[in-house]
Image: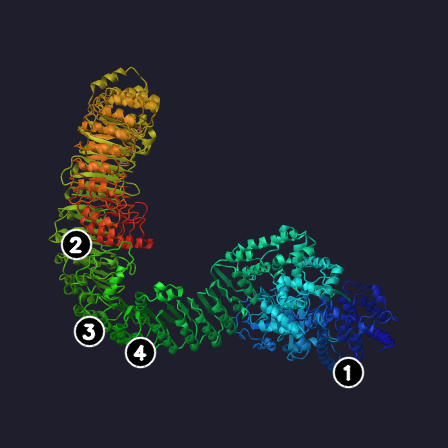
């Protein structure tokens, strides 16, 4: 159509449109309101005619722009009745944006034809980019321009607003048919136009400047490998699941990418590859192939790049995404889209760069999937199938976190780049002439690093470009030398691209600035304003930048620019950072960082700077220094400093503990630097164990890792688990001698991977452990590995588990065992192995001399090997060990363990196996459990067991054994001499034979046993045979089986333990068994539990006590059906099974023969009178002694009476126990009458009416006192009188315990009335009987009527106690202790009256009984005796608060004479002794008359005290604070005390004035015999004042001045006084600062003290000089009995002189010289003449050696008086005292920390036996072990008086502790054995303590509570 016709047609069309709309004004008004909601249609508008209103509306709609106009025209055609021809014209003219003429102004020029008829246009060469690889990304053509306002396009009509076209008629007019036909042709025409557009896009490729001709024509497909169908990519990188589609290393055909089996649902393929692998290239190549007709299965292919989709900020629909971003249809887009929906299975949508998305994927979906949304949301809907269901979607991405919108069934393909053949193919295509190809390939083959870089297609293209530029004019090898790193490849590429060959710094730096700003802001697409014009022109000219169209608004298009590849942008960013001075040191180092390729939960997308640190590292190399200097226009020194910053940052990173991905990236960086020192530093900084888990690794990654490892000296372990690995990765390990352990675990590894690995293995000389698990290796891959393994003789462990290997492959692998001399483990688990192959493997295990175990269980298959010693020596090159006969003999005596569990073995297989094993070595273990052997197979194995020489275990469990098979299997008991235990349980499917070595072998094993102290046992002269344990549990055995069973077992007289529990013998079977048991020999135990026994069956077993000598214990529990018959239960049964090592039968500790009683235990049974009668009659024939333990829920009166009446018929009975049994309330009365019925009863203990214990004595035993205990039995007042009446018949009643009953006050009163009739000689316990003060008063009142009461104590506190102790004769002096009675004032008269009647009372102690002083004053006033002496002790809190003055005032109120006063404020105690009747002292009367004129209170109190204390003989003040008033009162009192003989003031505080008062008072006490002033807080002056009172004390016998400063002049005062004390018997001056000079003066003063018996000078500093002075005096003290010179710094010289002197002290009894360095000379001196009467010898910490101690021991041996010896903290070792005669009265021996070991234990224990009176042995902190414990345990039963043994901090193990338990069990009175801090595990210690509570393992001393006196 010419322009004139076009213009005419446009005007006619406008007029026709106006006429149409004027007829439909109502519709038009509605549309205007819809499109123009803000337009006002007021009255003015209504006044216009229809034509004017239509024109006005059209003008307003037209002014809104092409989008609104397009939508309006669409509505007109769809909703109004428009003729077909007019509709075509409307849609063709105005149906899209280009057709937007100004129709409203007739006469305007029409638009150009290009605007009216847009069509597919070929893009210009300037806007095209190379489509080969990711290095130069193909641009998007103008037809694919991206709108920034996606919602405002022309397809916003019906599809967007939901409007439907209404047709006026439905006829089939020719016009309608023509329209329908046209609509059917539109999709076809659109698809043809789309294909034509793509063909034009990729059809024209011209090389750029400096590029070879083939540069744009080369495409070599990279390696593609199917992964498994992906899970949502939130999991770790590459962790995908599904079935593999192709073997690794094989090409995935392009058609295979779209051959998923999914018939329904989304068909999604994700292509994963690192940057530069060719993902974008492949996407464009697929488009090109489709356009060329090669992908004929697809009708349409749409390619989208997310880097451009990111520019769409609004929402859009899928039609908008397809037609706005891609080619738009000429007309009727809804028809085209409908066609695409109907043929979705032929539509392919490719989304490139999924990792580059910016907006997050929203999880919230709208109800309508066709609603507008973001581009990523539309992608998500396409993947999930909610949009365009059935279409094909392919996405490319770098590995990492991908959106969750990908479906779980999406297929994953890994892109691995180029292998060797592909590199050669690419080079052959790249270079046009043959010479250039050969030269380039030669350069690549020579340089291994350059060859490995070419594995990345992008780098391969760069390398080829550089070689194309460098090869001309250079000799071979020079070109490759210029390309040692990726960075330098890029540098050379810049030089190659510039046709002038001159480096242009300014534009390059400009590109660097643009690149860095883009990386920092996340921008990869730039506008024209982002890049300077000159820089843009430079980049465009060299092909460094690509350009493409971007639609930024209506009718306006701009160009967008991007670097040809992201890595190029990173390279230029690195150039900027290295060359710009504005980038400071800190900013530069911050960019040297490592990025983890693991999934980051907080990271929405992958970063854009993956290679930036690598390029920075590459630019830091020395080779780049001149290039950077030229580029930055700076000196090389400045560049070197910048490079050093990067190197130091990398070195710092190398010291950190990095994850696997970061280690790989750091290897790339360090390799780029080409710095050997840095590579060596990193290599040695790596940990020995290097794990790589769950991230993708390429050939280049592995090459960079092995490059770094090449600089390492030590071994390293590499572990790859879950990592997608490029198939040829193992090639990089070739020659890597540092790898010691290598493990791969990934389903990605297949035959190609195995083949590559097999080529590298022989070159890895240090490899010891190889693992290849969970792979897809087939026979082909295994064959390569099997061929390689013989070349790896150093391997120690190989694992091929979980590889789906078949029989042939497994056998091929096993054949290699002989070629691997050092192999220790071969793991072939989780493969497919048949039974026949399994038997072949067992034959290999039997014949191969190095195999020690074959373990097969279901999927497990493991060989364990022991390499021969000589083989290892040969490998090490040691000629001395080759041919050693002994080592070869040891190798021949190998043992084999065979475990074939759950392998479906049958009888025939067992026959084959037995034949193999009979020719094999010694077998440790054979485990055939879980197979199908049945009875026949089990019998075959059991019969073959003796010939197979199995040393440990044969397991035939879970093999379908029956009862008949059990009896046949038992034949092995009599034929196999090494059987230790046979356990068969049909219920639990258990059949286990346990063997022990032969006797000779066992003795050898015992010699090698690892016991701490080499225990030796007393073995019997004739070695006993082994006693096997037979356990036939839950085998459904019945009575009819017993004869056959016993016949099978009777052939073995060695049977030890027989367990028949869990069967169905019943009473009949048990009765039969009781008759058959004698034929089985001497058993050690018989278990008949769970056999449905009743009491009748038990009664038949009781008869066995008479017929079976070995039977000692019979236990039966009715409820749990527990039935046990056993011998002596002592010994190893105390510990849990398996806790201690087993020893040969007959090993004993050497104890004397102990008579073990027989015991019968009956629990949880109904004990009726008839049953009890039957039981007692059955027990009558049992030999004794006999212990019977019964337990039932309730025992009636009649049953108890029946039991008690039968006791006289059981003379052998020694113990009867009823536990956990509810006894009748009358039980106490029945038991009280038991003595008259059965005099053998010795002790009755009834507790809570649930526990009863009767101890009976035999006629041979000596009679002992009886004890009756009825505790917590509910006894009340009414029971007291009959109980006492019955107990009165027991003449030797010693103890009666009625505690925890309900007697109350009335019951006690009744008991006290009956008490004289009960012949108690020991104690009566009435504690916890709800008693009050009334009971206490009743007790006091009853004391006169109970002459045999010796002591009574009552405590009414929370722990109420009430004890009365008796004597056999009438007791003169009684003791009464009352605690927490809280007497009230009304109780005082009655208490005093009762006390006044108790004239035999000698001591009364009142503790917490009075609330204050007043009650005590009243009591003292009322207490009057006609004659006698009473000691009253008051312990109350107010005593400590009252003060001395107040307490003396209380004493003044006493009625009798006070002869003793003792006050202790700290102990809150006041003690006075009263003497009745009151008598006057004449001297006291005179003094009192002298004070009669003084009327003050102080003088009145003094007068009262003088009167009351006139006969005071002892005054003791301890821990008091004396005020001046108190001291003044004491002064007055002391003046009147003419009879005072003892004065004590200790641990008190006195003022100087008070001291003067006391000294003045004491100076008048001339009759003093004992003066104690020790431990007071006095200074020198105060001490001197007090010592002044010593003047004239000629009668003084005891003087204690310890802890007083006695130096200098103070000591002179003392020595002056000592000269007159001729009667002095005891002098104590400990810790008094006396030195050698003071000791010299003191010694001179002591010459006059010829009566001295005790001298204590401990903890002074007299030294050798003082000791020698003292030694000169000692012989002149004939009465000396005790001397203590401990801790005085005395050395050997002083010690020897003392020893010589002390031998002359014939009456010496106690000698204490500890904590002095006396050494052996002192001990030898003492040994020459020990005093005959010596009782105590303390020489602890005296530096004694074994020689001195031995001589001392010989001297002590036989001493009749020695009671205590302490030699602690001396180095005795083997010099412990050894006695031959013994010490008869020795009570305590202290040998703590003396280095005593096991060697000395035996003589020491023998010495203990010779000391029968020993009560305490202290052996803590020594070196004693189990042998010493054994010796102690042996002698414990012989030491009847021993109470305590301290063994803390020794080396005793659990075994030694168990030996001690055995020793205690022999009978011992020991209360505690301390074992803290010995090497005993806590659980074992607790177990031992539960068995024997007297063992104490605690840190604190938990000694048993003191038993009240009299019990």
- Position of residue 623 measured from the top left corner of the image (x, y, whole percent): 63, 58
Along the line of sight, which residue is nearer the eye, 411 or 688?
A: 688
For residue 1267, above or below residue 203: above
- Position of residue 1278 measured from the top left corner of the image (x, y, whole percent): 21, 47
- Res 1610 → quadrant: top left
- N-terminal label among 4 and 1: 1
Q: CA distance from mark 1 to mark 2?
A: 129 Å
Label 2 near label 1: C-beta < 8 Å? no
Q: CA distance from mark 4 to mark 1?
A: 94 Å
- N-terminal label among 4 and 2: 4
Label 4 neighbourhood size at 10 Å, few (<14), some (14-19), many (20+)? some
Q: Quadrant of the N terminus?
A: bottom right
- N-terminal label among 1 and 2: 1
Along the line of sight, which residue is nearer the eye, 1455 or 1775?
A: 1775
Q: Does the rendering let one see residue 272?
A: no
- Say what secondary structure mark 4 lies in: helix
- Say what secondary structure mark 3 lies in: helix
Along the line of sight, which residue is nearer the eye, 153 or 853?
A: 853
For residue 1296, above or below residue 1401: below
Circle 3 is placed at which residue position?
Answer: 1047
Q: Which mark is residue 1196?
A: none
Circle 2 is placed at which residue position?
Answer: 1152
Circle 1 is placed at which residue position?
Answer: 175
Q: CA distance from mark 3 to mark 4?
A: 28 Å
Q: Which mark is residue 911?
A: 4
* Viewer-side label of 1, 3: 3
Q: Quadrant of the C terminus?
A: top left
């Amino acid at each position: 159509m010419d322009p004139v016709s076009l213009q005419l047609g446009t005007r006619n069309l406008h007029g026709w449109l106006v006429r149409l709309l004027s007829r439909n004004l109502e519709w038009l008004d509605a549309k205007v309101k819809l499109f123009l909601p803000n337009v006002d249609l007021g009255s003015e508008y209504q006044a216009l005619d229809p034509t004017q209103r239509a024109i006005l509306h059209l003008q307003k709609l037209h002014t809104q722009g092409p989008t609104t106009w397009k939508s309006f025209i669409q509505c007109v055609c769809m909703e109004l009745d428009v003729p077909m021809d007019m509709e075509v014209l409307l849609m063709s003219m105005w149906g899209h944006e280009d057709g937007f003429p100004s129709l409203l102004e007739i006469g305007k020029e029409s638009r150009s034809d290009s605007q009216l008829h847009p069509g597919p246009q070929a893009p210009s060469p300037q806007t095209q980019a190379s489509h080969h690889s990711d290095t130069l990304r193909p641009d998007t053509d103008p037809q694919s321009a991206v709108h920034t306002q996606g919602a405002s396009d022309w397809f916003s009509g019906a599809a967007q607003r939901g409007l439907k076209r209404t047709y006026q008629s439905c006829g089939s007019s020719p016009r309608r048919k023509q329209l329908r036909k046209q609509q059917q042709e539109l999709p076809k025409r659109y698809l043809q136009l789309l294909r034509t557009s793509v063909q034009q896009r990729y059809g024209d490729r011209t090389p750029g400047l400096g590029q070879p001709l083939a540069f744009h024509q080369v495409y070599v497909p990279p390696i593609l490998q199917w992964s498994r169908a992906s899970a949502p990519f939130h999991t770790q990188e590459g962790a995908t699941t599904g079935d593999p589609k192709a073997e690794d290393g094989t090409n995935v055909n392009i058609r295979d990418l779209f051959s998923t089996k999914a018939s329904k649902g989304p068909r999604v393929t994700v292509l994963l590859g690192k940057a530069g692998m060719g993902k974008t290239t492949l996407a464009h190549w697929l488009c090109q192939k489709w356009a060329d007709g090669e992908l004929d299965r697809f009708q349409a292919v749409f390619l989208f790049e997310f880097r451009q989709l990111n520019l769409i900020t609004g929402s859009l629909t899928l039609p908008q995404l397809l037609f706005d971003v891609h080619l738009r249809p000429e007309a009727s887009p809804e028809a085209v889209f409908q066609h695409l929906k109907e043929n979705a299975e032929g539509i392919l949508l490719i989304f490139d760069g999924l990792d580059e998305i910016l907006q997050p994927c929203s999880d919230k979906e709208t109800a309508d999937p066709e609603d507008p949304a973001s581009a990523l949301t539309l992608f998500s809907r396409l993947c999930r199938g909610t949009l365009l269901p059935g279409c094909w979607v392919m996405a490319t991405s770098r590995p990492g976190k991908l959106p969750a919108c990908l479906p779980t069934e999406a297929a994953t393909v890994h892109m691995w780049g180029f292998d060797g053949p592909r590199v050669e193919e690419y080079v052959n295509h790249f270079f046009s002439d043959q010479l250039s190809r050969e030269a380039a390939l030669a350069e690549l083959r020579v340089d291994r690093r350059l060859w490995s870089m070419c594995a990345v297609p992008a780098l391969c293209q760069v390398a080829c470009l550089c070689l194309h530029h460098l090869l001309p004019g250079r000799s071979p090898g020079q070109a490759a030398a210029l390309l040692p790193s990726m960075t330098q490849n890029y540098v050379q590429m810049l030089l190659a691209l510039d046709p002038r060959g001159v480096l242009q710094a300014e534009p390059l730096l400009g590109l660097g600035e643009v690149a860095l700003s883009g990386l920092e802001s996340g921008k990869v697409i730039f506008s024209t304003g982002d890049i300077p014009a000159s820089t843009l022109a430079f980049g465009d000219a060299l092909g460094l930048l690509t350009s493409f169209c971007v639609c930024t608004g209506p009718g306006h298009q701009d160009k967008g620019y991007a670097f040809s590849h992201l890595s190029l942008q990173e390279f230029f960013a690195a150039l900027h950072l290295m060359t710009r001075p504005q980038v400071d040191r800190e900013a530069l180092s911050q960019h040297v960082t490592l990025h983890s390729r693991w999934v980051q939960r907080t990271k929405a997308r992958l970063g854009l700077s993956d290679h930036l640190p690598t390029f920075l590292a590459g630019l830091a190399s020395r080779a780049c220094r001149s290039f950077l200097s030229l580029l930055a226009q700076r000196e090389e020194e400045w560049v070197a400093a910048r490079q050093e910053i990067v190197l130091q940052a990398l070195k710092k990173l190398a010291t950190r503990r990095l994850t696997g991905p970061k280690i790989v990236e750091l290897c790339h960086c360090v390799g780029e630097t080409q710095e050997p020192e840095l590579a060596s530093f990193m290599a040695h900084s790596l940990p020995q164990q290097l794990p790589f888990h769950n991230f993708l690794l390429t050939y280049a990654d592995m090459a960079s890792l092995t490059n770094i490892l090449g600089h390492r000296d030590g071994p390293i372990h590499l572990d790859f688990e879950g990592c997608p690995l490029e198939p040829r990765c193992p090639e990089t390990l070739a020659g890597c001698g540092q790898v010691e352990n290598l493990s791969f675990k990934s389903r990605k590894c297949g035959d190609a991977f195995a083949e590559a690995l097999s080529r590298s293995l022989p070159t890895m000389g240090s490899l010891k452990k190889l693992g290849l698990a969970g792979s897809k290796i087939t026979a082909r891959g295994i064959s390569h590995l099997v061929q390689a393994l013989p070349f790896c003789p150093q391997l120690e462990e190989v694992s091929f588990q979980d590889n789906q290997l078949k029989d042939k492959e497994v056998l091929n692998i096993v054949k290699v065992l002989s070629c691997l001399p050092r192999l220790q483990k071969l793991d072939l688990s989780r493969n497919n192995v048949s039974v026949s192959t399994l038997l072949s493997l067992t034959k290999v295990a039997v014949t191969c001399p190095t195999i020690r175990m074959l373990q097969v269980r279901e999927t497990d298959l493991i060989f364990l090997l022991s390499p021969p010693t000589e083989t290892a020596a040969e490998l090490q090159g040691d000629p001395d060990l080759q041919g050693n006969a002994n080592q070869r003999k040891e190798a021949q005596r190998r043992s084999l363990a065979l475990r074939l569990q759950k392998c479906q073995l049958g009888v025939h297989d067992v026959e084959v196996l037995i034949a193999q094993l009979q020719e094999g070595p010694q077998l440790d273990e054979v485990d055939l459990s879980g197979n199908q052997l049945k009875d026949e197979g089990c019998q075959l194995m059991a019969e073959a067991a003796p010939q197979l020489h199995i040393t440990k275990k044969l397991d035939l469990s879970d093999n379908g054994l029956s009862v008949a098979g059990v009896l046949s299997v038992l034949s092995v008991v009599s034929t196999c001499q090494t059987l230790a235990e046979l356990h068969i349980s049909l219920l639990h499917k258990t059949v286990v034979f346990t063997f022990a070595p032969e006797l000779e072998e066992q003795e050898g094993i015992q010699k090698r046993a690892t016991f701490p102290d080499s225990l030796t046992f007393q073995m019997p002269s004739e070695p006993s045979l082994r006693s096997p344990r037979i356990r036939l549990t839950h085998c459904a055995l019945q009575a009819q089986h017993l004869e056959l069973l016993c016949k099978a077992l009777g052939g073995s007289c060695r049977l030890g333990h027989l367990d028949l529990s869990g069967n169905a013998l019943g009473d009949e079977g048990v009765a039969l068994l009781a008759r058959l048991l004698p034929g089985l020999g001497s058993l050690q135990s018989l278990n008949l539990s769970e056999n449905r026994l009743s009491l009748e069956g038990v009664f038949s077993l009781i008869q066995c006590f008479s017929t079976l000598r070995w039977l000692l214990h019979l236990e039966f529990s009715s409820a749990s059906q527990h039935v046990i018959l056993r011998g002596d239960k002592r010994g190893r049964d105390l510990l849990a099974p398996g806790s201690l090592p087993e020893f040969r039968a007959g090993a004993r500790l050497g104890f004397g023969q102990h008579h073990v009683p027989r015991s019968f235990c009956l629990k949880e049974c109904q004990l009726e009178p008839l049953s009890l009668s039957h039981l007692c009659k059955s027990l009558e024939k049992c030999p004794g002694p006999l212990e019977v333990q019964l337990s039932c829920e309730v025992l009636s009166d009649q049953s108890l009476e029946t039991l008690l009446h039968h006791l006289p018929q059981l003379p052998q009975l020694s113990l009867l126990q009823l536990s956990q049994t509810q006894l009748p309330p009358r039980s106490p009365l029945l038991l009280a009458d038991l003595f008259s019925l059965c005099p053998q009863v010795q002790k009755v203990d009834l507790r809570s009416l649930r526990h009863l214990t009767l101890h009976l004595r035999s006629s041979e035993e000596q009679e002992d006192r009886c004890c009756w205990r009825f505790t917590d039995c509910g006894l009340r007042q009414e029971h007291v009188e009959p109980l006492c009446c019955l107990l009165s018949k027991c003449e030797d009643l010693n103890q009666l315990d009625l505690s925890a009953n309900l007697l109350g006050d009335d019951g006690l009163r009744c008991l006290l009335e009956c008490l004289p009739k009960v012949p108690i000689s020991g104690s009566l316990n009435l504690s916890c009987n709800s008693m009050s003060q009334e009971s206490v008063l009743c007790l006091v009142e009853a004391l006169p009527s109970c002459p045999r009461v010796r002591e009574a104590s009552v405590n009414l506190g929370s722990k109420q106690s009430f004890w009365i102790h008796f004597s056999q004769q009438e007791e003169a002096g009684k003791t009464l202790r009352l605690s927490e009675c809280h007497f009230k004032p009304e109780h005082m008269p009655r208490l005093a009256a009762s006390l006044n009647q108790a004239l035999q009372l000698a001591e009364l102690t009142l503790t917490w009984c009075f609330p204050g002083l007043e009650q005590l004053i009243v009591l003292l006033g009322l207490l009057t005796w006609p004659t006698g002496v009473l000691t009253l002790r008051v312990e109350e809190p107010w005593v400590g608060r009252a003060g001395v003055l107040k307490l003396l005032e209380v004493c003044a109120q006493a009625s009798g004479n006070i002869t003793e006063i003792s006050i202790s404020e700290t102990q809150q105690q006041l003690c006075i002794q009263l003497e009745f009747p009151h008598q006057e002292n004449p001297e006291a009367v005179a003094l009192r008359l002298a004070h009669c004129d003084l009327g003050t209170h102080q003088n009145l109190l003094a007068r009262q005290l003088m009167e009351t204390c006139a006969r005071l003989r002892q005054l003791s003040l301890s821990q008091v604070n004396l005020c001046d008033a108190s001291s003044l009162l004491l002064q007055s009192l002391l003046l009147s005390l003419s009879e005072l003989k003892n004065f004590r003031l200790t641990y008190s505080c006195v003022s100087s004035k008070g001291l003067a008062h006391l000294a003045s008072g004491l100076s008048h006490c001339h009759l003093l015999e004992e003066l104690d002033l020790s431990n007071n807080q006095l200074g020198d002056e105060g001490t001197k004042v007090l010592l002044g009172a010593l003047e004239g004390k000629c009668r003084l016998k005891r003087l204690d001045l310890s802890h007083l400063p006695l130096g200098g002049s103070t000591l002179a005062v003392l020595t002056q006084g000592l000269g007159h004390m001729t009667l002095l018997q005891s002098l104590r001056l400990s810790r008094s600062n006396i030195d050698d000079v003071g000791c010299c003066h003191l010694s001179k003063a002591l010459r006059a003290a010829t009566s001295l018996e005790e001298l204590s000078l401990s903890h002074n500093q007299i030294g050798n000089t003082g000791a020698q002075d003292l030694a000169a005096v000692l012989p002149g003290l004939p009465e000396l009995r005790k001397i203590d010179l401990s801790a005085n710094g005395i050395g050997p010289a002083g010690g020897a002189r003392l020893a010589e002197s002390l031998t002359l002290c014939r009456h010496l009894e106690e000698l204490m010289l500890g904590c002095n360095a006396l050494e052996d000379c002192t001990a030898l001196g003492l040994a020459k003449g020990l005093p005959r009467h010596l009782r105590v010898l303390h020489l602890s910490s005296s530096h004694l050696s074994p020689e001195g101690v031995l001589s001392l021991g010989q001297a002590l041996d036989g001493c009749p008086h020695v009671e205590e010896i302490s030699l602690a903290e001396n180095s005795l070792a083997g010099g412990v005292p050894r006695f031959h005669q013994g010490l008869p009265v020795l009570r305590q021996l202290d040998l703590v920390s003396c280095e005593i070991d096991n060697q000395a234990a035996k003589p020491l224990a023998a010495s203990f036996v010779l000391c029968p009176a020993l009560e305490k042995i202290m052996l803590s902190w020594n070196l004693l072990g189990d042998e010493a414990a054994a010796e102690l345990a042996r002698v414990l039963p012989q030491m009847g008086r021993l109470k305590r043994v301290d063994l803390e901090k020794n080396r005793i193990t659990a075994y030694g502790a168990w030996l001690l338990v055995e020793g205690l069990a022999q009978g011992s009175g020991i209360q505690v054995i301390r074992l803290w801090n010995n090497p005993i595990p806590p659980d074992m210690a607790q177990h031992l303590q539960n068995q024997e509570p007297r063992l104490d393992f605690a840190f604190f001393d938990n000694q048993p509570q003191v038993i009240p006196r009299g019990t």
